[in-house]
Image: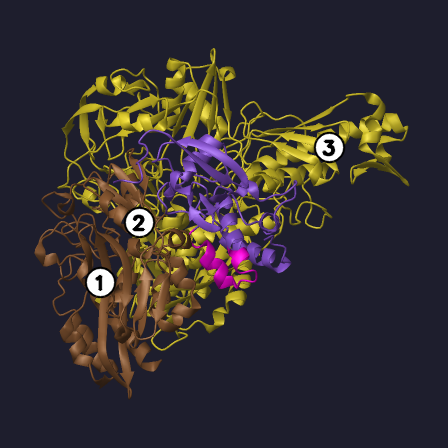
Amino acid sequence: MEQLALVQGDDAEAWAADAVLTIVGRPQRRVEGAAKVTGRARYTHDIRLPGTLHARILRSPHPRARVRHVDASRALALAGVRGVLHRFNTPKTAFRGEETIFREEVRFVGDEVAAVAADTEAIAEAALSLIVVDYEVLPHVVDLEEAIDAASPRIDEKGNVLDADRYERGDVRKEFAAADVVVEGTYRTSTQLHNSLETHGAVAVWDGDQLTVYESTQHVFGVREGLRNALHLPLANIRVLCDHMGGGFGSKGGIGKYTIVAALFAREIGAPVRCVLDRHEENVAAGNRSATLQRVRAAGKDGRITAIAHESWSNVGQARWVADPTGPTKGLYDVPNVLAHAHRVLTNTGSLAAFRAPGYVEGTFALESAIDELADGMGVDPLALRRRHAGSQVDPVSKMRYSLKRLVDCYDIGAEEIGWSRRARGGLRGSAPGLRRGLGMASQLWSGGGTPPAYATVHLNPDGTAVVRIGTQDIGTGTRTVIAQVCAEELGIDVRGVRVEIGDTDAPYAPISAGSLTVASITPAVRLAAKDAREQLLDVASGVLEVGRAELRVEGGAVVSRGARTPIAKVFEDLENYTVIGKGSRMPNPDDIVLKTFGAHFAEVEVDPATGMVVVERVVAVHDVGRIVDPLTARSQVEGGVIQALGFALSEERVVDKPTGRVLTSGLETYKVPTVRDVPRIVVRFVDVPDTVANNVGAKGLGEPPIIPAAAAVANAVANGLGVRIRHLPLTPRRVLDALAAAS
Amino acid sequence: MKPFTYVRATSVAEASRMVVAGSAPLAGGTDLLGLMKGGIASPARLVDLGGIDGLNGWSRERGAGLRIGALTPLVDLETSDQLARHLPIVREALRDTATLQLRNAGTVGGNLLQRNRCWYFRDAAIQCWLKGGTQCFAKEGENEHHAIIGTARGCNRVAPSDLAPALIAHDARVTLTSTRGTRSVLLADLFTDPALHSREEHTLRRGEILTEVQVPESGLQRRGTYLKAMERKTWSFALVSVAVAARIRGGKLRDPRIVLGGVAPVPWRVEAAEAEIDGHPFSDDLARRAADLLLADAAPLAKNGYKVPLAKELVRRALARIAAA
Amino acid sequence: MPTVRPSGPGAVDVELDVNGIRTPLHVAPHTTLLDALREDVGLLGAKKVCDEGTCGACTLLVDGRAVYACMTLAVACAGRSVETVEGLARDGELHPVQEAFIAHDAFQCGFCTPGQIMSVVALLRATPSPSADEVMRAVSGNLCRCGAYPNIVEAALAAARKGKERP
């Protein structure tokens, strides 16, 4: 799709690889650090407005049913109850392609049926049980593979299995026939739950026809757009705020039904209304990474991969989109013949939401497992086989050149660090008798080049401090900090002199904090705004100091000319409240060039075949994401991605009871995210070469890359160590023991 | 949580009087409050035992065994080097019990009396047999964590406590006090025999307060160890756990105990398995024979067959460990 | 002859010592310490993430021990000392553990951070020079979904090395 972006002015020359930068590229403490360690940081959960009412949501106890009647009279009679919303009394409010937030046919256990607003959360909760709903229970199916089966109840008139995307290049059929070696595997991944620690939620308050919503979100502007569509308000009447937020991982891309519930109640009752999900609601109704079933065939001939066919089925709940797992198959390796076919499968379970590298995590596991199986079949080292297809500087899908691709460098660095030369077919002996040790690796492909539009302003105050305003949000990645760094670097002031104002739709637009978009989208705009401010400052300084403009520069908070330093405050001293306002916008990406990020993970594991325990001892994560703006937060980002991937690989699994459709693992005791003790030694390395073609900062995104290859690398390491491949994640003791029993 | 009245007892007698129908005793609260929040329990009155003196701490009198007050926080047992010399298995069992915060609050009595973790039982919307319904949803359902042995009609739960198998392996007894008097029972008998088809997990009677755990001198003579398999490295209930204890004389295992957690509705012992090894020096073969006897009646469900080899391996390792120590 | 009268189910008076301040509360017996602090005292540092004792985000100290505030009844804390993350900094100066968390980037979204910090503070009081294993055991009941764990361990060890933990 053509990108259309209206921008002002010219771009700045990208900082060159050898540019001497004093703030960008150096470790920087998070600017919001003190707020977070003192408990002072305010999250949506912490918003306390006087007179706030509390909303709770009644959720369907059935996986599929028609709501025939709702009787809320007893709930309304309860003292402290201020209102009840359900499908028979709620105005049409568009939500994700549907006309209303309360469906006539509820589609999963947890689907929204009604909502109560009351003086306290406890009263609202108590009132839920007083609402009488007449359900006509309908046949359901919750399991992916059962839903695919034609004999299962059809939950959509078009059927449960819907085509999503088909792609082909070359002639796969011919190459499979001509191949020396063909491997075929069926891979399964389980539903992963985001479990952001701050659950989804919103607080809405009206002042006349002005709506303010506090929401835990990755996109304040997306929430504004959702409210505009649902409530038909002018954008000027909506303000969305998100100061701090407790994690999203893709699931907080826009409004939720709770947002609309809060806004409707707040308008109807005339008081602020808070609607925040509890942990169990979060895990049934706020999104997930789809479970997948994937079949991969791969063919090899003369030491090269000649063809890959990848077909996938994803359990999307009722979603109208699918997180396509075949992306890596299409684009990661320079393989001439590829067939990819993704299917969307409807079930009566909570729908997917984007989850950090949606599709790519699942797909990389299947693809990279199959590549290892092919390498084994061909009798070649799996890394050596990948190298033959990783060096091309041309994107195999678009046939355009990459702006920068250092995937082979990632292999070199990672192989050296992990000691890949020790890897042996059939694995290594472990640290104690009976234990097996294995090495595995996998590659990463993702976008991350960023996009317009994004706008920023920089106000340079008379004392030489600055305020950056941009409507992005910090979802925990360190966005505030990199903004401050880029602003300070460009402006020539101390980073501590920069205040960053974000999380507010009254600030200039910025894109969603997702898709590894943030740094590459917003920092170039921030840089241009700072540059604009600096140039205006120099104009003023030239006049005040009576020195030629060309002889001046800003450095360390002072205007410097030959031999003289004038602090910015001094320049402005006699100008009263003169304020410099710099503006910047994100320029379009270059035409005819593909912006991607690359990386490779190497894992070393020890497996106990007698107990099924898998211990990941070390992960080496190497990424090629352009310039690293803050090495401290970048390392954190990679460690966090690896750890989330390890949960996906080893322990995280949504379990749904088939007859009742209930999620049995909706709490944090049964749904096992990694604890501190599950974390291996993680070695983080960056190629750290700025992508000067991509944007004026040279940085690309790093949110998603580190979660993409880790599970595949671990699975390959386990297969290497055990000599048995387990094609179903997570690799719990049960799966390991069952696989070993089946193999013997 | 439903509202309730709250009263703080100052003596066991007072507590016993107040724990009437509809009341529940509150110690650390780490299980009870979870049950109440989940809608599984809704007592009208909580009787806080926290103000009762004399139930917190442990003592060892030569010849008289070890006494542990029921209100002793788990963490105090875990971190006591002195206790670890008398009964090292307690530290081994508690180190990976729940989390530090839960061990700080949770008590010995509460740990032994905690209710099972079956995810059907813990879901208030599911009326399973144990909660008065007619069927066990796990039997044909998602049963990877459920019992493989010792289940009678109705319920496939597993006993969740780490401490119970460890203490049973050392022949621990518990003291139960009520207004009707005091009785001492084997800890093993605190768990309702599944064959009785009872919907109570414990044999505690109404008004009884668990006040003390005793480990007899003979139990302290055994060398014991505890192993636990989990789905992550910590903060998990056992997939399978095993406590073994025996006197080691002349390289031979004497008077052994093997107790499994996570496999049956109660901590699981089979006397024939213990008899098999009694008086013999450890060997892998001996351990395998014992494990086979211990699990001879195992009848796994569709998704928990893995527990059989896992339990056997843990038994072998645990016996090897005490034999080698 | 009952010597003690049950209170509730309506609100009752209790007095807690919160960060060294005598804090009278009027709460129902089923009010958790977490809800009492967040809704009645206005201390919002401890977070409600699971509300069932599984995640650690509400960790604080009662009589010096780290516990889950969501699994503690406010009435059961009458007369006891409660320490929250808000009580750590003194005279505008961060506690060494807080300082170390910033220096070592031991958080991302920050939602688990107050709980992590309280767990580390409790550890360092009892064990001023912990091993990495001891640190991990102390915070293994504090889940971090962003995966800041390696830095949390580093921060705790660094704070210990500085040896500035106040008694």
What range of the chain is rendered magenta? C123-141
Instruction: Select label 3 or label 1 by which is in front.
Output: 1
Crowdedness of circle 3 by 10 Å Cα count: few (<14), some, many (20+)? some
Task: Give coordinates of residue B320: x percent, y percent.
Answer: 30, 78
Q: Chain of mark 1?
A: B
State the residue position of label 1.
B187
How far apart, in angstroms, are the residues tagged by discs 3 and 1?
A: 70 Å
Colouring of the image:
by chain
**Which element is circle 1 on?**
helix
Residue at 30% across, 81% down: B323
Residue at 32% across, 52% down: A309
**Residue type, mark 2 in image:** Ser
In the rendered view, does B101 fall on the left or right side of A571? left
Q: On residue A465, which mark appears?
A: 3
**Residue type, mark 3 in image:** Thr
Question: Total number of numbered labels?
Answer: 3
